[in-house]
Image (cartoon, grey):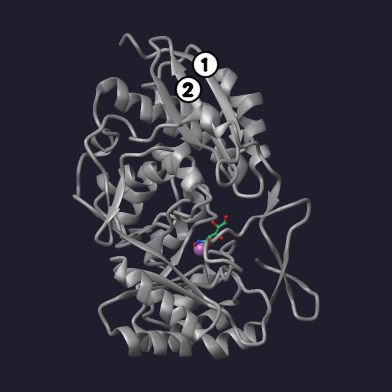
C-alpha cells in the first residue's frame, strides 16, 4: 500500500507538567503517529533504548507490519522482557497503530476488534490524610460524577504513606537528585485500613464502587487477612497486595477470600501474568498498554484473560501521557472483557501539550470517531519545558530496613 513507509522516528523527552517521553514516527507520505515511552523515574533509559536501538531499525519498514516489527524487536534483541525494553517496544507499536488508523481513516479501536462498548467505567483516587479528609474527598469526587473511587488514607503513626501527597494533586515522583524516603508499618496499616472502608460505606452506602491499592507491601498471609477484613465492604478490587514476582503467592490469597484481586501495573509481558490468568488467581489484570509492550501484545493478554473470567483494569496514572491513556481507551473499547479504567486527569500544562479527543463525563470515559488514537502532540509547546530529573520514592520499615515502595 502506498503511504505506509516509515521515513523517520524521533524521541522527544520533555516535562510539560511532568516528565514524558514521546515517540514520533513519520511516514514518507507525511503522516505522523505518536507513542508514549514514559517510565516514571527511569525516563532516560527508555529514551536511550529507543534512540540507539529501535528507531533506526524501523526506517523503511511498513507501518502495517505491527506484528512483525514487534517480534523483530522482542525476539530479535535476544534480551527479552523488562520494563525499559517493553516500554520502548510498546511506544513504537502504539505509534504504528496510530498511523494505521490515520492512514485508513478510522479510529484505532476499529482495527483491534471494533466497538464492544460505547463508554468505559473510570475510577479515580481519593487520597485523604485522615478519615475525615478521605470522606471529604470521596464526597467531592462523587459530586464530580465518579461512580468508582480508589480509597487511600494516611495511617496514624506513619509519617509519609504511599499515595498521600502534601498537596491535592497526586505525583509520586519528586524532582531532584535523590528519591524521597517514605516509611512503613504493616502492623499499623492492617489495624487501621478496614475502619476507613467502614466509614466510607456508612457515609456513602453500597452503590459506590470502592477500590484500594496495597502497593506490593504485604506477605500472602497478611494479604489474606486484609482481603478477609475488607469482605464486609464489598470492594470492586484490592490491588497489588503482594509483590508479584511469585505468581503462586496469589493462590494462598485467592483461596481464602472473596474480595476481588487485581495486579499487574508493573508487569510487562504475558509471562508475568500467565499463571495468574490460567489458574484463575486474580479477577483483574492491570497491565497497561505502554508498559505492557504496546497494543499488539495487550490484545493477546486480554484474549487469554477472557477465557478465564478475568477482566482488564489498565493502569492509568498521570505519569503515562494522554497518548498512552488513549491507547488504553481504544484497547478497552475493542475487547469484550473490559473491567474498568484508572483515570487521574492531567495538569493544565500536560493537557495543552497533548490535546485529545477522549473525554470524561458522568463517571465514564468516551472516545470519538476521529481516525487514529485521537491525541495530538503540541511539540513546540512541550519542548519549552525541558526534562527535569525526578525519582519515585523509596520506602523503609520503621527500623530502617529497605522495603517495597
Ligand atoms: O505507583 O504510577 O495504581 N496506581 C499506582 C501508581 C504507581 C505510579 C508509579 O509511577 O500504583 O500510583
Ligand atoms: Co497501583
Residue 177 percent coordinates (x, y): 78, 51
Q: Label 2, on which residue? A: 25
For residue 278, side relative to residue 338 (left or right) = right
Residue 171 visible in this rendered orientation of the protein = yes
Quadrant location of the C terminus in the rendered image: bottom right
Ligand 1 found in image quarter: bottom right
Residue 252 percent coordinates (x, y): 50, 77
Q: Label 1, on which residue? A: 8
Q: Are marks 1 and 2 in contact (CB under 8 Å)?
A: yes
- Spatial CA distance of label 1 from label 2 is 6 Å
Report the residue that reaches farthest toward the right.
Answer: 400
For residue 115, side relative to residue 384 (left or right) = left
Q: Quadrant of residue 98?
A: top left
Q: Is mark 1 within 8 Å of ligand 1?
A: no
Residue 82 visible in this rendered orientation of the protein = no
Number of numbered discs: 2
Residue nearest the viewer, comparing 125 with 386: 386
Residue nearest the viewer, comparing 300 with 10: 10
Nearer-N-terminus badge (1/2)? 1
Element type at marker 1? strand
Q: Residue at x 49, y 52 (%)?
A: 318
Amino acid at each position: 500500500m502506498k503511504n505506509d513507509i516509515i521515513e523517520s522516528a524521533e524521541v522527544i523527552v520533555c516535562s510539560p507538567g511532568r516528565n514524558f517521553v514521546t515517540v514520533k514516527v513519520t511516514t514518507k507520505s507525511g503522516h505522523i503517529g505518536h507513542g508514549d515511552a514514559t517510565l516514571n523515574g527511569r525516563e532516560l533509559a527508555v529514551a536511550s533504548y529507543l534512540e540507539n536501538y529501535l528507531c533506526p531499525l524501523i526506517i523503511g519498514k511498513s507501518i502495517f507490519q505491527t506484528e512483525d516489527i514487534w517480534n523483530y524487536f522482542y525476539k530479535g534483541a535476544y534480551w527479552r522482557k523488562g520494563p525499559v525494553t517493553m516500554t520502548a517496544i510498546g511506544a513504537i507499536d502504539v505509534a504504528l497503530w496510530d498511523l494505521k488508523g490515520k492512514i485508513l481513516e478510522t479510529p484505532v479501536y476499529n482495527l483491534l476488534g471494533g466497538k464492544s462498548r460505547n463508554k468505559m467505567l473510570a475510577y479515580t483516587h481519593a487520597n485523604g490524610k485522615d478519615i475525615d479528609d478521605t470522606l471529604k474527598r470521596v464526597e467531592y469526587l462523587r459530586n464530580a460524577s465518579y461512580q468508582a473511587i480508589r480509597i487511600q488514607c494516611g495511617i496514624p503513626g506513619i509519617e509519609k504513606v504511599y499515595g498521600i501527597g502534601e498537596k491535592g494533586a497526586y505525583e509520586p515522583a519528586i524532582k531532584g537528585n535523590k528519591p524521597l524516603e517514605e516509611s512503613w508499618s504493616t502492623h499499623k496499616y492492617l489495624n487501621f485500613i478496614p475502619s476507613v472502608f467502614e466509614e466510607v460505606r456508612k457515609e456513602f452506602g453500597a452503590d459506590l464502587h470502592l477500590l484500594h491499592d496495597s502497593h506490593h507491601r504485604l506477605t500472602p498471609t497478611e494479604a489474606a487477612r486484609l482481603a478477609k477484613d475488607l469482605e464486609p465492604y464489598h470492594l470492586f478490587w484490592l490491588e497489588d497486595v503482594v509483590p508479584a514476582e511469585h505468581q503462586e503467592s496469589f493462590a494462598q490469597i485467592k483461596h481464602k477470600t472473596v474480595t476481588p484481586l487485581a495486579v499487574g501495573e508493573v508487569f510487562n509481558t504475558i509471562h508475568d501474568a500467565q499463571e495468574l490468568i490460567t489458574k484463575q488467581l486474580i479477577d483483574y489484570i492491570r497491565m497497561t498498554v505502554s508498559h505492557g509492550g504496546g497494543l499488539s501484545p495487550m490484545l493477546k493478554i486480554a484474549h487469554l484473560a477472557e477465557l478465564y473470567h478475568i477482566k482488564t483494569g489498565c493502569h492509568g496514572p498521570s505519569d503515562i501521557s494522554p497518548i498512552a491513556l488513549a491507547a488504553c481507551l481504544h484497547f478497552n473499547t475493542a475487547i469484550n472483557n473490559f473491567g474498568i479504567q484508572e483515570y487521574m486527569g492531567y495538569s493544565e500544562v500536560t493537557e495543552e501539550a497533548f490535546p485529545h479527543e477522549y473525554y470524561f463525563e458522568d463517571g465514564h470515559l468516551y472516545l470519538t470517531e476521529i481516525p487514529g488514537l485521537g491525541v495530538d502532540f503540541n511539540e513546540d509547546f512541550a519542548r519549552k519545558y525541558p526534562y527535569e530529573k525526578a525519582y519515585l520514592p523509596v520506602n523503609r520499615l520503621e527500623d530502617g530496613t529497605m522495603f517495597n515502595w
